[in-house]
Image (spheres, rainbow, N blue to C red):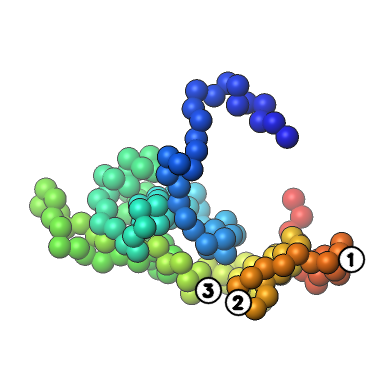
Amino acid sequence: MKNPWKSESAIDPQCDNGFRRIANDVYRAITVAPINAAEMKIALFIIEKTFGFKKKWDVLSKSQIMFGTQLSKTSITRSIITLRSKKIVYYEPSDQIVKGSRLNRFLFNKHFDTWAVWDKLGPDFDIVQYLTESKIVTGRVQIRNNRSADLDSTKEIEENKKRINFVKF
């Protein structure tokens, strides 16, 4: 399939110009997590500033986050506090002081099974089980030593789909 808008574009994004390395399960978890748009923008920005530069954490100012997300200072403050309470982002004071204010160190919590959000998707929702089942549904299964293998047949995929409750759009 060809992208019909490529000819309209003035850019040519390539991984050679930088990329964020993130585990597929973490990526899937953040897309499923019941968080609002501002929280998503901030989480993705922190991923960019940490994982994107092969760091576990980074010192960030509110003005950096404002510039990187186009959110207001009030929205950022509220969302950062909420993300911490949801255990998605952790922050603590750093040793750096800029214009009289101490900056915070930010860390994105890649251990998504500890995020305090999953109960919003139902009392029986289990993110680890969901991600495991979604791998089965898409035709990939994890086997020993973190190798993966294709399911042998459409029949196996269809049988596994029956076990999962899908949200219809």
Name the residue nearer the viewer: 88 or 2.
Answer: 2
For residue 55, say whether it is visible: yes
Compared with 51, 74 (above or below) is above
Three-letter amino acid code of the residue under disc 3: Asp
Three-letter amino acid code of the residue under disc 1: Lys
User: Percent x, y for residue 163?
Assistant: 80, 72
Labels 3, 1: front one: 1
* Residue at which label 3 appears: 113
Image mark for residue 24: none
Q: Residue furthest left?
A: 100
- Which of the two labelled residues, at mark 2 and mark 3, occupies the earlier sequence position? 3
Classed neighbour count for the residue bearing mark 3: other residues with Cα under 10 Å, few (<14), some (14–19), many (≥20): some
- Which of the two labelled residues, at mark 3 and mark 1, occupies the earlier sequence position? 3
Image-based side of 108 in relation to 135, left or right: left
Classed neighbour count for the residue bearing mark 2: other residues with Cα under 10 Å, few (<14), some (14–19), many (≥20): few
Name the residue nearer the viewer: 22 or 148.
Answer: 148
Name the residue nearer the viewer: 76 or 147.
Answer: 147
* Residue at which label 2 appears: 145
Quadrant where the N terminus sits is top right
* Residue at which label 1 appears: 155
Q: Secondary structure at mark 1?
A: helix
Residue at image position (29%, 45%) is 64
Q: CA distance from mark 1 to mark 2?
A: 26 Å
Labels 2, 3: front one: 2
Compared with 114, 47 (above or below) is above
Q: CA distance from mark 3 to mark 1?
A: 31 Å
